[in-house]
Image: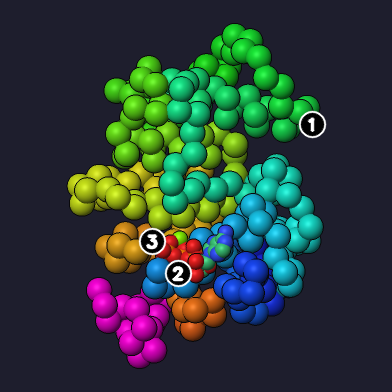
């Protein structure tokens, strides 16, 4: 397998607080890599560094062999790094369908090297067709015409996932995709994530606290503790690691 994402010696501080200490992280093409660790371990911070939402204080990040350390988040999206957030980011006053149209048109502008322009122009049929495909694929049929801000938590997450897919990522990063979901919504989310991973041939990087979700999806597991990686490998191997049990899994 080849590495699609390689991070070396990542350091990140907020003021005097060192959040990530010399983190080396690899993600192989096609894997579903789950990062776990206690609250405040630095998982979201690592995501933000990898996606370009925040700059690192030291280290290097390569995506598909290209050094992306100095690139912005938007530039990394164009290269194929997509992400969703711990709290869903959508346009709350527009309908779910309009949100999807915007995501698809953003990708088309990116492909053509155009900049985002405001102002609503009726979408082309091809864009509408693609949005409709995503609606069916992600089970959003009952919610497409609702104002996005009023959707249930589960549907907001689904919409956000659909919008990320519309940007045609190669790697999709999901920060706690099942946070705040009921057990049945959670099982459904796992099914959906596994389905889009297969259907789109995506590499996945996710953080998650729910162990059923973690072990239901992970092909590789990394444990972050106080900003340092304390274990990484096959899920079964990491699960039986004594240090991991002590600092994290023992609590679950
Ligand atoms: N923007 C920020 N400014 C200052 N400190 C921050 C900022 N973001 C995160 N931190 C601090 O960095 C540490 C790691 O936070 P982070 O959100 O990365 O943890 P996490 O592993 O994602 O936790 P959780 O499981 O609760 O989501 C915490 O101590 C947090 O308070
Ligand atoms: Mg977090």
Left or right, 175 with respect to 3, comes to: left
* Magenta stretch, residue numbers: 232-252
Q: Is mark 2 within 8 Å of ligand 1?
A: yes
- x and y percentages locating residue 9 in the rendered image: 69, 77
- Residue 113 appears in the figure: yes
Helix, strand or loop at disc 1?
Answer: loop
Q: Is residue 131 visible?
A: no
| 237 left or right, relative to 230 | left
Give percent across and percent down for residue 133: 45, 25
Label 3: element kind: loop
N-terminal of the two: label 2 or label 3?
Answer: 2
Residue 1 in the image: state x and y as whole percent: 60, 67
Q: Is residue 94 above or below residue 235?
A: above
Q: Which residue is mark 3?
A: 208
Is the CB atom of the residue marked by disc 3 within 8 angstroms of ligand 1's nearest atom? no
Distance in Å between CA atoms under marks 2 and 3: 13 Å
Residue 94, placed above or below residue 67: above
**Which corner quadrant of the image does residue 55 belong to?**
bottom right
| 197 w.r.t. 120: above or below | below
Residue at mark 1? 113
Q: Residues within 10 Å of mark 1 (few under 14, many from 20)?
A: few
């Amino acid at each position: 397998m080849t590495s699609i994402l390689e991070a070396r010696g990542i350091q990140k501080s907020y003021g005097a607080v060192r959040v990530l200490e010399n983190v080396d992280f690899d993600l192989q093409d096609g894997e579903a890599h789950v990062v776990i660790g206690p609250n405040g371990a630095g998982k979201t911070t690592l995501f933000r560094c990898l996606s370009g939402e925040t700059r690192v204080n030291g280290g290097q990040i390569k995506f598909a062999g290209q050094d992306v350390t100095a690139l912005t988040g938007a530039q990394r999206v164009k290269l194929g790094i997509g992400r969703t957030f711990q709290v869903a980011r959508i346009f709350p006053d527009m309908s779910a369908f309009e949100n999807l149209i915007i995501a698809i048109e953003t990708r088309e502008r990116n492909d053509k090297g155009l900049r985002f322009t405001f102002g609503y122009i009726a979408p082309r049929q091809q864009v509408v067709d693609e949005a409709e495909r995503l609606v069916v694929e992600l089970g959003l049929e009952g919610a497409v015409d609702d104002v996005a801000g009023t959707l249930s938590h589960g549907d907001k997450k689904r919409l956000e996932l659909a919008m990320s897919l519309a940007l045609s990522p190669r790697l999709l990063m999901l920060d706690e995709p099942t946070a705040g979901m009921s057990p049945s919504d959670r099982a459904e989310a796992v099914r959906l994530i596994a389905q889009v991973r297969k259907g789109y041939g995506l590499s996945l990087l996710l953080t998650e606290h729910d162990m059923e979700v973690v072990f239901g999806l992970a092909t590789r597991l990394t444990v972050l503790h106080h900003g340092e990686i304390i274990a990484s490998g096959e899920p079964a191997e990491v699960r039986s690691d004594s240090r991991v049990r002590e600092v994290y899994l023992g609590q679950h």
